[in-house]
Image (cartoon, rainbow, N blue to C red):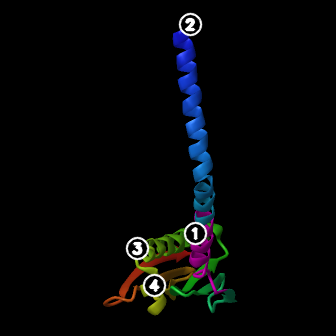
Amino acid sequence: MPIKIQKEKRRCKTLRRLRRLLSKYKIYAILAIVIIVLFAYFFHEYRSEGSIKHVNEITEPCKYPGIDVVTTTVDEKTYRSAIHYPKFTAEALNSEINIYVANMKLRFFNELFQYDERQLKKRPATFYLTFDIYPVADHIYSVVFKKERYFGEGNPEESTNIFIVDI
């Protein structure tokens, strides 16, 4: 029995020390939590500064029947983009074109996030996706996309992609 009492006394003593220690450092813990919350708030505000400033989307008729031109422009602190793509009356064609445009935007943003934001604010990246339509035969057109990307270093990257569509 005396052993149990000694163990109980030691445990009580340890708990008292722990309580004293916690009461001493309670102010430090509260201060640390406040600092973490403030840091998270300002970090969020800093990242929000680069939010999209101006987005404009316009759909206009094309000179070819059954085709409209969709133009989306974005002007942000770290990048600028202008994307032009055709919109057809046939949904199957639209889905293929939309997948292509989405993939090009995704590739641009994946590479954009690898660059330093401060550098991009000094010299914003650019992304342009344009297209030309050439009639091939009755209701058959060649849609030639031209993509240009620039990240503020060296030469811009340019490429083309061709779709043959039957409307």
Look at mark 1 in the image and give the residue it sits on.
39
Look at mark 3 in the image and give the residue it sits on.
114
Task: Please state which amino acid type lies under the numbered disc 4.
Answer: Arg
Secondary structure mostly seen in the magenta stretch:
helix
In front: 118, or 53? 118
- Depth check, mark 4 against mark 3: the one in front is 4
Cβ atoms at labels 3 and 1 below 8 Å apart:
no
Residue at 63% in and 63% down: 34
Q: Which residue range is magenta in the image?
A: 36-55
Q: Is residue 88 left or right of residue 2?
A: right
Q: Is residue 155 left or right of residue 44?
A: left
The numbered disc on residue 118 is 4
Look at mark 2 in the image and give the residue it sits on.
1
Residue at 56% in and 30% down: 13
Label 1, label 2: how many angstroms apart (C-alpha)? Answer: 54 Å
Q: Quadrant of the C terminus?
A: bottom right
Q: Quadrant of residue 46?
A: bottom right
Cβ atoms at labels 2 and 4 below 8 Å apart:
no
Q: Quadrant of the N terminus?
A: top right
Kindly give the residue lying farthest to the top in the view shown: 1
- Depth check, mark 1 against mark 2: the one in front is 2
The numbered disc on residue 136 is none
- Depth check, mark 3 against mark 2: the one in front is 2
- Depth check, mark 3 against mark 1: the one in front is 1
Label 2, label 4: how many angstroms apart (C-alpha)? Answer: 71 Å
Residue 108, percent from left and from top: 45, 76
Residue 74, percent from left and from top: 59, 86
Label 1, label 4: how many angstroms apart (C-alpha)? Answer: 19 Å
In front: 39, or 152? 39
